[in-house]
Image: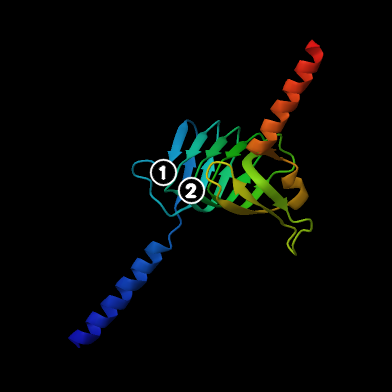
Amino acid sequence: MFKLRTIILVIILSLFLQGQSNATITLNWTTGDYNIPYPGWPGGVSVLNTYNNVTVTMLGGGGIGGVFNMYDNSQLTMYDGFIGTLNLYPDTTAIIKGGDIHYLWIDPATTGWVKLYAYDMYVDPLPDSQGYLDIHGNWLADNSFFDIELQNGISTYSHIQIVPEPATIAFLALGGLAVLRRRKR
C-alpha cells in the first residue's frame, strides 16, 4: 500500500512539474528602456509585448522563444539573441545587426520599418505554400548566416531596408571623390 501511494504521489508531482515547465511567461513593458538579458531575466519568455515608446536592446544570452509584439512607437535594436516571431505593428522600428529571428511580420498599414545590417542578401523569388518569403544573408557584425521567414511576404519585405556591405560603401565613397575631383578641374 505504501509503494502504491508513493508511486501515485510521484506521478502527481511529475505532472504538476511538467505543467509548470510548459507555463506561458508573458511580459508587458509599457514605458522605458530595457535590455535583454537583464539581471533576473526570467528566460523562457513566451510572449513579450511593448507599448508606449519602449526601447529594447537585445544582447547575447537572451531571447524570446515565442512571440515579440511591438506596438506604439516601440523600437528594437538587436545585436544577438533569438526571437521566435517578431511582429511589428504601426509606427514601430527594428534595427537588426545580428541574432536569430525565425519569423518576421510587419503590419501592412505601418509606417515603421526594419533595417538589416547584412550582406550577400538573397530573397527566394517565390513565396512558400503559406505565402512566406525566405530572406537569407550574413550579418555585417560577425559574418554569421541568417535565414528569416517573412510572413505576409512582399508586404513585409517592402518595409525592410538593407544596409549595404562595406565594399559597396567604399565604392560609393570612391565614386563621390572622383566626382568632387572632376568638379574642381
- Location of residue 79 in the rendering, given as x and y in whole percent from the top left corner: 51, 41
Residue at horizontal 76 percent and vertical 17 percent from the top: 180
Measured along the vertical axis of the image, is residue 149 above or below residue 178? below
Q: In which quarter of the image is residue 93?
A: top right
Q: Name the residue under label 2.
A: 81
Q: Mark 1 points at which residue?
A: 37
- Residue type at tag 2: Gly
Does any portion of residue 164 appear in the rendered image? no
Residue at horizontal 41 percent and vertical 43 percent from the top: 37
Does any portion of residue 66 appear in the rendered image? yes
Label 2: which secondary element: loop
| Mark 2 Cα-neighbour bin, 10 Å: few <14, some 14–19, many ≥20 | some
Q: How many marks?
A: 2
Label 1: which secondary element: loop
Q: Quadrant of the N terminus?
A: bottom left
Residue at the top extreme, as displayed: 184
Q: Which of 155 and 7 is in front in this view?
A: 155
The answer to whether mark 2 and mark 1 are in CB contact below 8 A is yes
Residue at horizontal 34 percent and vertical 44 percent from the top: 40
- Residue type at tag 1: Pro
Q: Distance between the residues labelled 2 and 1?
A: 9 Å
